[in-house]
Every structure is written in structure tokens, then in C-alpha cells.
Image (cartoon, grey):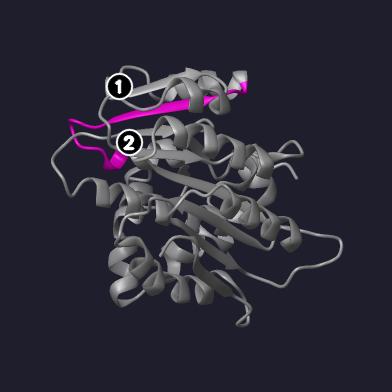
């Protein structure tokens, strides 16, 4: 499948992915020491929901559109607040027109001492990414293969932080590439937090990914998944997942609060389901 960010900006998968992202960054901010976020497949950073790509699919209406219109309640609403603040910051006039990708969300959350390193391999997208962060001294936007960066840009000098790996799944073998990338990165920086996003399209492929992760012997791998419908033939995107290595100790409880509400909000007629378990570790 091709999951280039622009066509799917703000859809149900982005909502879940970016909520998890904000919870990890908010946790890192609990300590005063600086941290760095390495975003390996950053895209362009900001998406026009009325533009050609996002407007063509309209997926955002059943993702961030539902969350903005209907909201969450109680503790789940509190957990989602930093994420929604980042979205609203790009829409100061109130109407939902622009959706921030992961680098814009992270940048919104950073403190003065923190840094973002955003990478993008697609040349046109990389140029737009650089333009979007022009003059920002806390962000370095670079035309670079994010997979290669796992071997050359770790560990960060801050020794604290997050590696977000969110590939477009344009080519076969992305699941195997994620496992190999994790092994390489973890050898260089075993104490870092790693968050790998993946689409749920073919359940057997996703389960093999989990088995391969477990076989690495790396401890503390938390799996977070949400599906909005049952699997189908032929396969189609019906769910979103993220594995987090060395997750914040708060993340499991936070997702236990948020996922049930998100499943109800993002799926129709009670079809939403969620899973939260440890592939390895606790």
C-alpha cells in the first residue's frame, strides 16, 4: 500500500498516532533536561485539508474532523488536549483547514531547550519541509533517508528523546525494515524511546511483525492498536498500530483511558476495537 502522508492527513490513523506522540513528548517534558526528537519520515509537516491530496480522499472528516466536532470526555479529553492544541494552533481563525503532521506537532510542544531533527527522503516533500521550518533554530529539516539516520544520528547529544518512525509503506518489506532498523538503532542507543507506526491491512502480516520484534530480545515493547472495521478481502486499511520501545511508564495507563473513547468515536456502529499489550517486557 502507499501511505504517503499528504493523502491521509488527519485520518483516524493520524489521530491515534499523534495522540500517542503527544503523550510521549509530554512525558519527556516532565524533566528539565533537554531532549531531541528524530522524525525519520517527516513528510512536509503541514497539510491543507482542502488541497488536492487530502481533499481527494477526504479521510480527515472521519478522523480529526470527528474529534474536533464531538470531542472526548473526562480523562480522555485531558489526555487529548495537547494534541488538539497543536491542531488548533495551525487554525487560528477557528475553522479546520490545516492539519499538522508529526514534525509540526512536536515543534508545537517543544520547550526552548529541546530540539527536533526532521528527515524526509522524497525531494519535493523535503524542500517543502525545509521551507516550513525556515529560520527555526530548534528544528533541523533535512533531505535524508530516515533508515540510514538510525545508524548515523544516534545517540543524540542530549542522551534523551524519541525516535519516531512513520514510513509511507510505498514498498514491500517495510515491516522487516522496521525490525532491522530497531535492532540497529537500539544497539547504538538502548535507552532511547522508539515509536514505530504501522497500518493494519493484513492481520497475518502484522502478527508476524510482532513475532519478529519479540525475537529481537529487546525488552519493553508496548503494542497499541485500534481498528475501525473488520478485515476484508481484498485487504484494505482498517486499523492503525504503534509499537513503543522503552515507553514512558505513564503511557499504558493513559492509553487504557483514551482508546475505548477513540474506538467509539472513530468507528461507526460499534465496530471499533482496540488492543494494548506487551510484545516483550512487562
In which quadrant is the C terminus drawn? bottom left
Mark 1: few/some/many CA within 10 Å (<14, 14-19, 20+)? few
Q: Which residue carries the number 1 mark?
A: 136
279 versus 172 height, above or below: below
CB of mark 2 within 8 Å of CB of mark 1?
A: yes
Give coordinates of residue 207: x percent, y percent.
68, 60
Residue 195 versus residue 139: which sits nearer the camera? 195
| Left or right of residue 215: residue 46 | left
93 versus 208 height, above or below: above
Q: Residue furthest bottom?
A: 270
Residue ID at (16%, 45%) = 31
Give coordinates of residue 250: x percent, y percent.
29, 62
Point out the tag, 2 or 1, that comes first from the N-terminus: 2
Q: Which residues are magenta?
A: 107-122
| Left or right of residue 47: residue 29 | left
Give coordinates of residue 67: x percent, y percent.
45, 64
74 versus 195 height, above or below: below
Q: Which residue carries the number 2 mark?
A: 107
Amino acid at each position: 500500500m502507499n501511505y504517503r502522508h499528504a493523502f491521509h492527513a488527519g485520518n483516524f490513523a493520524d489521530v491515534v498516532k499523534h495522540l500517542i506522540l503527544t503523550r510521549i513528548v509530554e512525558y519527556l517534558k516532565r524533566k528539565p533536561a533537554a531532549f531531541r526528537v528524530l522524525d525519520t519520515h517527516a513528510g512536509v509537516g503541514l497539510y491543507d485539508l482542502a488541497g488536492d491530496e487530502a481533499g481527494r480522499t477526504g479521510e480527515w472528516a472521519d478522523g480529526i474532523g470527528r474529534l474536533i466536532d464531538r470531542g472526548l470526555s473526562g480523562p480522555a479529553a485531558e489526555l487529548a488536549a495537547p494534541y488538539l492544541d497543536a491542531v488548533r494552533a495551525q487554525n487560528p481563525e477557528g475553522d479546520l483547514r490545516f492539519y499538522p503532521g508529526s514534525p509540526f506537532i512536536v515543534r508545537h510542544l517543544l520547550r526552548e531547550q529541546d530540539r527536533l531533527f526532521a528527515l524526509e527522503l522524497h525531494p519535493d516533500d523535503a524542500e517543502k519541509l525545509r521551507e516550513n521550518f525556515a529560520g527555526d533554530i530548534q528544528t533541523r529539516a533535512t533531505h535524508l533517508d530516515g533508515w540510514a539516520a538510525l545508524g548515523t544520528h544516534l545517540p543524540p547529544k542530549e542522551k534523551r528523546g524519541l525516535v519516531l518512525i512513520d514510513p509511507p509503506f510505498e514498498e514491500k518489506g517495510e515491516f522487516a525494515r522496521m525490525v532491522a532498523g530497531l535492532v540497529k538503532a537500539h544497539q547504538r542507543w538502548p535507552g532511547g524511546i522508539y515509536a514505530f507506526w504501522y497500518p493494519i491491512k493484513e492481520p497475518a502480516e502484522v502478527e508476524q511483525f510482532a513475532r519478529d520484534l519479540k525475537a529481537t530480545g529487546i525488552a519493553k515493547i508496548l503494542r497499541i492498536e485500534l481498528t475501525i472495521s473488520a478485515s476484508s478481502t481484498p485487504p484494505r486499511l482498517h486499523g492503525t498500530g504503534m509499537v513503543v520501545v522503552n515507553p514512558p511508564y505513564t503511557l499504558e495507563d493513559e492509553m487504557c483511558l483514551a482508546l475505548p473513547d477513540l474506538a467509539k468515536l472513530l468507528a461507526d456502529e460499534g465496530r471499533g476495537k482496540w488492543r494494548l499489550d506487551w510484545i516483550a517486557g512487562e
